[in-house]
Amino acid sequence: MDEFHVPLAVTSAPSTSISDLLIAQVTSSPSKVLIEKQEHGSWRPYTTTQVLALVESVAKGLMAAGVEQGDRVAIMSRTRFEWTILDFAIWHAGAVPVPVYETSSADQSAWILGDSGCVAAFVETPAHAAIVAEARAENGGLPKLGDVWTIEEGALEAMVERGRGVSDADLAARHAAVGLEDTATLIYTSGTTGRPKGAELTHGNFVELCSNAIEDLSEVLSYPDARTLLFMPLAHVFARFVEVLVIAGGVTLGHTPDTKDLVADMGTFTPTFILSVPRVFEKVYNSAEQKAAAGGKVKIFHWATKVNIAYSRALDEPGGPGLRLKALHKVADALVLKKIRAVMGGRVVYAISGGAPLGERLGHFYRGLGLVVLEGYGLTETTAPVAVNRPAKVKIGTVGPPLPGTAIKIAEDGEILAKGIPVFRGYHNNPEATAEAFTDGWFHTGDVGSLDEDGYLTITGRKKEIIVTAAGKNVAPSQLEDPTRAHPLISQCLAIGDRRHFVSMLVTLDVEMLPSWLQTHGREPMTVAEAKEDPMVLEHIQMAIDRTNKKVSRAESIRKFVVLDQDFTIENGYLTPSMKVRRNAVMNDYADLIDEIYAQSAPAKTPAS
């Protein structure tokens, strides 16, 4: 199938804005707990009425500070309670929030603040304020940028005080002037190459997509005492969409600013569903495996995992799991699986995964664990999801069918095209890029995939990242990288081999997992520099690659690998803030090493080190 449309399920009045989604919750459930804010080790509840009151008070402060209708206001912070309040307050005041990753440099911040024309900014810490000050100093003062308020220095409280003189009528007029066609936010793409582009997303993109997603994901959002803990960066479209979705759906929302606190926060907040990227799901699995190994129970863990995955796969077969497999699964659950569920708070029923392929093995592992994993697909330019698996019918290995009001088409070259309510208006200040992104109203995603007879989409890889070997074989890097990265020793990996005679791989070690892995295998502690040369470490990485190679043809298989002495991180510029590898940056900086890999005419029988 080359094209699949899902009709619109819910329509919205043209005058509707994102703020109206919050107001609707107050009207229907004024005393419902909508957000819980972590304070001094406990969670402080805010009802829908209290959330709206705080949003309106901050919005009035913005108006008193001179923020006009349509003005851009930046937010540079980690994911936290105040970000959600600021988002809705800026929208309520008729302005446009512009997210900036809290890890951004002065140069990156200057580009976003300048290109978007921000008139003011909220930053989380004095250190962020210093980055903005540096951005001003080095970029002509950023003449449109006025006040910079710091969250940790009482910015919200100051806004509430400042706005006391603004009337309810003036605020209501601001709110009433915004509708579906108005710009809601500018989200700058992570930019694996070149300057990030500002995607203009409208209130209609969010309102209509959320309203229709609520209809199709009602089991998730209407689950008894539904609650989710947001730890993905709110500067990313994935978390931003979910922020609006849960407010619109009346789901209790919590925030975790630091992922190091995630396990503890999940234990106290007890979410019913979580959203994350596959790397976090891999980390949970790998940590559980290493903990079992440290306790001398790794064989039991592996047995339980094998039973668990077999049980999940049997759920897709006629008749489902047999009596024997059901019995084994109960034993596996009692010995191992229930402990992993407890790590995630004990109440998680649904997990929404996006940003990269989760992989068939992990998909079955988590479903067997008792989680309904809803893998989805989308981009900044599509307000996050264009497709997602539905609770009633999950096809592991796919990202599901389009959401209502959305259409997906596969072009002749395999590229995925999208059209409908989630698709953005265009790139800010960049008509050329906007024109290039569309053909007859269809948005070019840059990804390659296929549709099955039910309209379920499978992602093959990125169009620009497809490796074409010297023999003319097309190789999708993701089918090699995703399964290899599942090994607990491996943090990141990058398949290479474009116009070369065979495929190779650059590998980085997981610094957090290395000590426990070494201890489990009876080895003394060692540095990454030592580990990358260690025969046992290399042997186990080769074993992981051998497992990956069994899934592909000989022409696509990884014939050599090199372990690098540093990981790919946001700080060193090899990862985007959304945790995608900047392939071009790695290829450029390691060009000499890559040439060495291919210095021989044929691959060596043993891995390079």
Image (cartoon, rainbow, N blue to C red):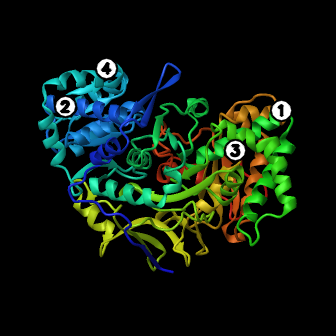
From the image, state whether disc 4 or disc 2 is nearer to you. Answer: 2
Amino acid type, mark 4: Gly
Which quadrant of the figure has residue 408? Answer: bottom left
Q: Position of residue 334 (x, y in %)?
A: 81, 43
Q: Position of residue 60 (x, y in %)?
A: 19, 31
- Mark identifier at residue 295: 1
Q: Residues within 10 Å of mark 3 (few under 14, many from 20)?
A: many
- With 497 as the anchor, is 309 left or right in this view? right
- Regarding mark 4 in the picture, which secondary structure is present there? loop
Q: Residues within 10 Å of mark 4 (few under 14, many from 20)?
A: few
- With 399 as the anchor, is 142 left or right in this view? left
Seen from the viewer's position, the closer of residues 500 and 144 is 144
Amino acid type, mark 1: Gly
In the picture of the structure, the residue carrying the numbered disc 2 is 60
Seen from the viewer's position, the closer of residues 27 and 195 is 27
From the image, state whether disc 1 or disc 2 is nearer to you. Answer: 2
In the picture of the structure, the residue carrying the numbered disc 4 is 154
Are the residues tagged 3 and 4 within 8 Å (C-beta)?
Answer: no
- With 257 as the anchor, is 440 left or right in this view? left
Residue 202 at least partly seen? no
From the image, state whether disc 3 or disc 4 is nearer to you. Answer: 4
In the picture of the structure, the residue carrying the numbered disc 3 is 285
Give whichever of discs 4 and 1 has the lower sequence position: 4
Seen from the viewer's position, the closer of residues 186 and 130 is 186
Seen from the viewer's position, the closer of residues 499 and 128 is 128
